[in-house]
Amino acid sequence: MAKVQAPVSKNELLEVTIEDLTHEGAGVAKIEGYALFIPKALPGERAKIKVVKVNKGYGFAKLIEVLEKSEDRVDETPCPIFDQCGGCQLQHLSYAGQLKQKQKQVRNVLERIGHIHNITVHSTLGMGDPWRYRNKAQVPFAQREGGLVAGFYQERSHEIIDMNSCLIQHEENDKVVQVVKDVAKKIGVRAYDEKKHSGILRHVVARYGVNTGQLMVVLVTRSRDLENKQKIVEEICKKLPNVTAIVQNVNTKRTNVIFGEETKVLWGEEYIYDTIGNVKFAISARSFYQVNPEQTKVLYDKALEYAELTGSETVIDAYCGIGTISLFLAQKAKQVYGVEIVPEAISDAKRNAQLNKMENVDFAVGEAEKVIPWWYAQGIRADVIVVDPPRKGCDEALLDTIIKMKPERVVYVSCNPATLARDLRILEDGGFKTVEVQPVDMFPHTNHVEVVAKLQLL
């Protein structure tokens, strides 16, 4: 096998200038065109680095010393486990710097992957207070010599860092994790061991209705049998007086997927409720619901603005989930049709429509790329199509359907700028023009950015 030819070698010490950030938040330096990725380094910095891995086209290095600092560098990050935990990647970058970087990332990806130039990419819409924003925590347990621990995984590993507080979680979620940890230790519930597939308690999931104050505790267990169930419930209720639902989810499989198929209420309600703007939502243990409700409203308001609804339009919401965007659109549209492949999500969507007494919304279970052509054959013509796909982007068949249907506008909500850029290129080649793009910071201190794009039929 030919030896990898690179202008650097493993363990070499170098002085470099950081030119950019990757979408994962690592600094990028180039040696004779060869890219080195350096976690915790920031654009504009001069740094001393040590090469740790050399691949054919790129390598990885460790930051040894910052010689010239970026004005956006935060010297003392507020989280004590930031250097170990993989949850946040950008706490060392000022919040203003994060917003600028996310705008730049979106613009670069649109140009590089989508070949879309000279369009307005607005400044990223950020939060006034970018901390304590997550309304949902999913925390794994492990058994150690000193007893049970709960926390987040160390970056690129399955080692759990014991944690008492997370600065991007709502304080109520922190309380839940701490209480469940204390109760499990007191009663003697053993944590799940993924190597041996033994023990009981796999995860605790906390869900908090930020605008209603309602709290759900979900215990994810390896087996249906949960010893001292009644005692566990009593202790949780005693320590969390605002809890409205305690639920057990059973996951018997050897997997790192959190939830199993079976969910049962141990105490209280099956749902908690929350609101986004004027719309109320019922949230079950496994419902998909945006984790940052404050920024979700910002995101959906922008989608509604881009849809330009006057009250006479028919709108299709592909990948509608539990109906969050559909119900926002239904406030201004004549009729909204939502489609989603997950049957439980459509059940939630229908319940949410009833909850809000909205009768101008219809939901269907199925693949958008199959259901939407069927609707089209039934004579349903969409003036506006809204898509909010998973990270992999839209199915090609759905994009073909949109191009054939020729709606006046397409509003594309994306959690992955790379697949957004790819899909916008296809829609542009099919007769649409990207008018403007708005990044929204749904996940401060992480490398993720949401984007809303407005497309017009030419």
Image: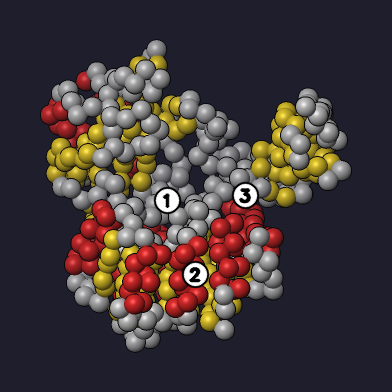
Of label 2 and label 1, which has the lower sequence position?
A: 1
Q: Which residue is mark 3?
A: 23
Q: Amino acid at mark 2?
A: Asp
Q: Residue at x 15, y 28 (%)?
A: 229
Return the x and y of residue 110 as percentages of the image width and height.
64, 63
Q: Amino acid at mark 3?
A: His
Q: Residue at x 38, y 31 (%)?
A: 255
Q: Nearer the viewer, mark 3 or mark 1?
A: 3
Of label 2 and label 3, which has the lower sequence position?
A: 3
Q: Nearer the viewer, residue 128 or 375?
A: 375
Of label 3 and label 1, which has the lower sequence position?
A: 3
Q: Which residue is mark 1?
A: 133
As measured in the structure, the alpha-carbon distance from the residue carrying label 3 to the one carrying label 1 is 22 Å
Secondary-structure class at tag 2: helix
Q: Nearer the viewer, residue 396 or 438?
A: 396
Q: Nearer the viewer, mark 2 or mark 1?
A: 2
The answer to whether residue 126 is seen in the rendering is no
Q: Which residue is mark 2?
A: 400
Image quarter of residue 405: bottom left
Return the x and y of residue 194 as percentages of the image width and height.
38, 23
- In the rendered structure, find residue 428 and report the number of the disc placed on it: none
Q: Identify whether 127 is placed above or below 300.
A: above
Q: Identify whether 149 is placed above or below 364.
A: above
Secondary-structure class at tag 3: loop
Image side of residue 161 versus residue 115, left or right: left
Neighbor class of circle 2 (other Cα within 10 Å; few <14, some 14-19, many 20+) is some
Q: Nearer the viewer, residue 334 or 186?
A: 334
Q: Residue at x 34, y 21 (%)?
A: 197
Q: Identify whether 192 is placed above or below 382.
A: above
Return the x and y of residue 86 as percentages of the image width and height.
53, 36
